[in-house]
Amino acid sequence: MGMRVLVVGNGAREDALSWRLAVSPSCEAVFAAPGNAGTASRGENWNIPVTNGKALSARCKEERIDLVVLGPETAIAAGVGDRLRDAGIPTFGPDRSAGRLESSKIFSKHFMERHEIPTANAVVVHTLSAALKTLDEWTGACVIKADGLASGKGVIVAPDAQVARDVLTEWYGASRIPGGGAGVLLEEKLEGRELSVFAIGDGRALYPFAAACDYKRAGDGDTGPNTGGMGAYSPPHGFPSDMEDQVRMRIIAPTLRGLLAEGERYIGVLYCGLMWTLNGPYVIEFNARFGDPETQVLMPRVNGDFAAFLKSAADGALDPSAASLSERTCVGVVLATTDYPRSNAPLPNLPGDISLSEGVQAFWGASTSQNGKINAAGGRVLTVTALGGDLASARSEAYTAVGKIAKRFGSSTGLTFRRDIALV
Ligand code: AMP
Ligand code: GLY
């Protein structure tokens, strides 16, 4: 009997995970909660919010689920992993305590300092007066980070102390610190190229699995506001040839030592958001989950039995031979509504029957399907990915597919996308 797998979440990341799990030899059925138009094409969507651990656990028991894969950070921070594991349900995704590496930037920074993991120097403040006092001595740019989860809206890169003062005066003055807490990090700005590295934890070890580059700004040439991510490609291009070894020794090894020393059993993906500086890799942030849109460009590269791979990690003994990554390159371009990231205007009635050529996949963001039409919730609507022998051919295939889809949707649809993804 094959495995029955639940994917928690409703974005293009979860569509990509569900797609790869569904074609895994050991997977019999794949469900999603709450899922989207893409996951609905492969199995039942359960109408349960991602943070409702009690309802998820009860339904998993009823449906005899063998493995749960947690997508979003909100589920992890709400303790859904703890709840499912307490109920004896194998779960890929950390518990709330280990998940603080993402859900609290102050916890994460202190963890890195305790375990000598390279990261930007930072000062923690809890009040406006402490922040302003710190800025009196500040030279150069200042990266301001709200402590809590803020869906990408909690980080501001201020070019100088005056801009930082203005931001903090607004945050504290209006009592509106993104994420809702009182703590803020003031951090030195690192220079270099960004890189996302995904390590798989099984509670005992961390195995580097994959790496990707992500484009966070809304506009071409890295201009405009920060977003959840407008495109990605994998594997990364133009980093030192010993990149993997450096990341393993300087980042993954001390992180694992730190987790074990602090009694954390990390099961799931540890997403290391890195800046490659003149002095090698520094951690910008940890996330406790797969990246979006990085996952959309990783899943097409996965060979083997991905369901068995994640299940072995959830069971506490990763079988690294269960899955591997192909040598091919994958490029993904996000199509978003024109108001994104300011707001998310719903986009109803999109054609659901997009035909794609070999090696091309399109993953739906938050959406529902009805009579063959897709109603998108808005924001990041679709991630279009293509595999190629090298970066240039994958890029060209991806943009050809984007062009076809944009045409199929019609010019009045008003979806935007970056034109410089994977142009390195
Ligand atoms: P985060 O949510 O912490 O990943 O921050 C969002 C984005 O802000 C990152 O992807 C970087 O582009 C930028 N950023 C955050 N911290 C720093 C830093 N210390 N130096 C330079 N850029 C940063
Ligand atoms: N792509 C950035 C993130 O998933 O946080």
Image (cartoon, helix red, strand yellow):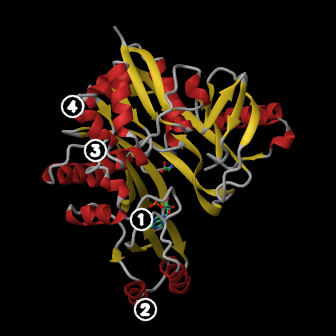
Quadrant of residue 50 within the rendered picture: top left
Q: Is residue 51 left or right of residue 416?
A: left
Dot 4 surroundings within 10 Å: few (below 14), some, or many (20 or more)? Answer: some
Tag 1–tag 2 contact (CB < 8 Å): no
Which mark's residue is nearer the viewer, 4 or 3?
A: 3
Q: CA distance from mark 4 to mark 3?
A: 14 Å
120 versus 248 height, above or below? below
User: Who comes first in sequence, dot 4 or dot 3?
Assistant: 3
* Place of residue 18 in the rendered image (x, y in percent of width and height, measured from the top left): 49, 27
Q: Residue at x 38, y 82 (%)?
A: 127
Whether residue 345 sits left or right of residue 133 in the image: it is right
According to the picture, the residue beneath numbered tag 4 turns out to be 316
* Residue annotated with mark 1: 278
Question: If you read the primary sequence from the N terminus, does the residue marked by circle 1 or circle 4 appear first?
Answer: 1
Residue count near mark 3 (Cα–Cα under 10 Å), binned few <14, some 14–19, many ≥20: many
Q: Report the Cα–Cα distance between label 1 and label 4.
A: 37 Å
Residue denoted by label 2 = 136
Percent coordinates x, y for residue 381 in the rendering:
66, 41
Query: Which type of secondary structure does the marked residue at label 1 adopt?
Result: loop
Name the residue tied to disc 3.
95
Measuring from the top left, give residue 231's x and y in whole percent: 60, 46
First in sequence: mark 1 vs mark 3: 3
